[in-house]
Amino acid sequence: MSASTGKLYLVPAPLDFGCATQTPLTEALPQGTLVVAARLQHWVCENAKSARAYLKRVNELHPLPCPIQALQIQELPREVHKKGDHGGTFDARPLLGAALAGHDVGLLSEAGMPAVADPGSSVVRAAHELGIEVVPLVGPVSLLLALAASGLSGQNFAFVGYLPQEAAARAQRIKELETLVQKTGQTQLFIETPYRNTALLDALLRTLQPTTRLAVSSGLTLADAQSRSGDIKQWKQQGWVLDNNTPAVFAIGR
């Protein structure tokens, strides 16, 4: 690694993206992370508009080195947003020219930690290939917060992304995950686009066995955050519901 090469910082964002209310940054992110974010002038992100909105909030606490419109912000390609970049097919090395020129670069997603249940792994992989130091910063990761709040196994777990949207395929996938839970005890974590929260919950209640445990955390780090966990029989008895506006993490286990 050259002494003149910049670093790639993985900068977490608050989990309130797209929510009606926002969490004060100082309640979601440590000062050290905010200080680093405030000094970076070069960024790779999902969406430049939301990145600027986040950095405007940072600027209110720690002044940025230049006006927000003067920051150098590059977006990941649209196909990365649609198909993801975890498979290793997208070459992100051209996005890291600033780091090779000696500038530190921030990688930012819409919410939470970039490259975890969000695009960005291609940028991290490219940094390693180019000999650029990768520095993850501390901040909220919805998957881990939900897992900790679930009461399910935190020793053996997997994140499986999104379930199929088509009803029959979704039910089949739910049964496959439940079988894996029963055989191994491995907690299965997954997410859904918020407007389909209710549909996914209904499918889980229809498909899972009464003794399988289901945990759902929504609105994590927000004032109205909720984490509920119980077996399917209890979910039906309690009549617990979800709204279709708040991001949620689902988990099944035993």
Image: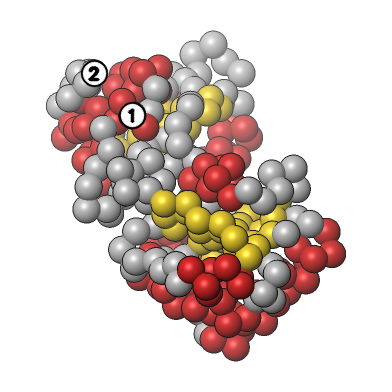
The N terminus lies in quadrant = top right
- Amino acid beneath label 2: His
Q: Which mark is residue 73?
A: none
For residue 125, side relative to residue 35 (left or right) = right
Q: Could you tell me which residue is drawn at 39 percent across and 57 percent down? A: 247
Residue reaching furthest bottom?
168
State the image quarter where residue 101 is shown: top left
Q: Position of residue 117 (x, y in %)?
A: 52, 51
The color scheme shown is secondary structure
Q: Which mark is residue 27?
A: 1
The C terminus lies in quadrant = bottom right
Q: Is residue 8 visible?
A: no
Relative height, residue 220 to residue 239 (above, below): above
Q: Nearer the viewer, residue 80 or 193?
A: 193
- Amino acid beneath label 1: Glu
Q: Position of residue 31 (x, y in %)?
A: 36, 18
Q: Is residue 21 visible?
A: yes
Q: Nearer the viewer, residue 100 or 170?
A: 170
For residue 83, side relative to residue 242 (left or right) = right
SS label for mark 1: helix
Q: Where does label 2 land, which residue? A: 62
Q: Could you tell me which residue is drawn at 22 percent across and 53 percent down? A: 20
Task: Estimate the spatial distance between the alpha carbons at disc 1 and disc 2, rounded to whole Å.
Answer: 15 Å
Q: Position of residue 238 (x, y in %)?
A: 48, 68
Sooner in the amino-acid sequence: mark 1 or mark 2 = 1
